Image (cartoon, helix red, strand yellow):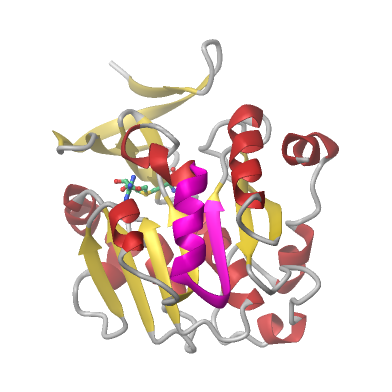
Amino acid sequence: MDLWYTEKHSDNVGITMKVTKTLFSGVSEFQQLEIVDTLEYGRMMLLDGLVMVTERDEFIYHDMITHPALFTHPQAKKVLVIGGGDGGSIREIVRHPEVELAILCEIDGLVIDKSLEFLPTMASAIDGHHPRVKLHVDDGLAYIREHQDAFDVILVDSTDPIGPAVGLFEEDFYRLVFSALKEDGIMVAQSESPFYHADIQKSMYQNLRTVFPIVEMYQAFIPTYPSGFWSFAFASKKYHPVKDFDRDRAAKRDFYTRYYNEDLHLGAFMLPTFARENIS
Ligand code: SAM
């Protein structure tokens, strides 16, 4: 008998994948966590039944939540990730030699533990041995309150605006992020699908625009996320992701990136009209 996992993207549409094995299933104080083996996408993490990461397409999301900010900022030394317990964002951040310290603030220690156990290619840099990585198991909202003028880049690699992540899409949180960033700091946050989540995007970008002088959206193709058309919010105190982008510096990077490149960096900020309208 075939076993299929389905995530509903709306009441009438979803993605369904053939599952070969359930590697872990459990409930933390915050959410239901499953890690399953799929025929098409390899191992996959689900939180409250929603796709978080898969082995096959995680390179796209983790390239695109990290490298645009780190190649726009001229020298990001201290980087904070809120959420990101699978470790993929931290793995990409520490590939940048200029980064002296990458801090992960993940609310749910079970996500870190099970990522280390079942998703080692993603969690490679959060195993506690990386000299430039520090882990905190804490609510990002509480953690950010204790830090002023501390970070060059803050990445909000959170779940959707439900449960523990709901506060990470509010104006108050963005004001806290603004004050936790240095005077030329940059924040990037995953900002859902322009195709399915226009309402979430409208309020999220309105909130960002009341706080940051520069707010742009950029896109990426992520096949296992609703509609496959995904987006990120780029909020910056000083540097513009296109006008201030040093293409040569990105082109000369000494590490391979399977999705990101110096031309895609610019192209990702070119949006279809309907996506522009979501945030105008
Ligand atoms: N790439 C995924 C996406 O776009 O949906 C996100 C993956 S990562 C696993 C999301 C993480 O955010 C989860 O591990 C969750 O526990 C964490 N998270 C949610 N709310 C949080 C909060 N308030 N503070 C810190 N981490 C939080």
Q: Is residue 106 left or right of residue 157?
A: left
Q: Is residue 35 left or right of residue 151?
A: left
- Could you say where residue 121 lies in the image, as x and y percent from the top left? 33, 63
> Is 182 colored magenta in this rendering?
yes
Specify the quadrant that holds the C terminus: top right
Q: Is residue 240 above or below residue 12?
A: below
- Residue 42: which quarter of the image? top left
Identified at 68% across, 30% down, the residue is: 195
Answer whether residue 196 is visible to the viewer in this image.
Answer: no
- Could you say where residue 94 lies in the image, as x and y percent from the top left? 41, 78
Number of callouts = 0
Q: Is residue 115 left or right of residue 213?
A: left
Magenta span of residues = 170-189
Identified at 58% across, 32% down, the residue is: 200
Identified at 44% across, 37% down, the residue is: 160
- Residue 79: which quarter of the image? bottom left
Q: Is residue 85 above or below residue 67?
A: above
Answer whether residue 209 is visible to the viewer in this image.
Answer: yes
Q: Nearer the viewer, residue 244 or 125?
A: 244
Identified at 29% across, 32% down, the residue is: 20
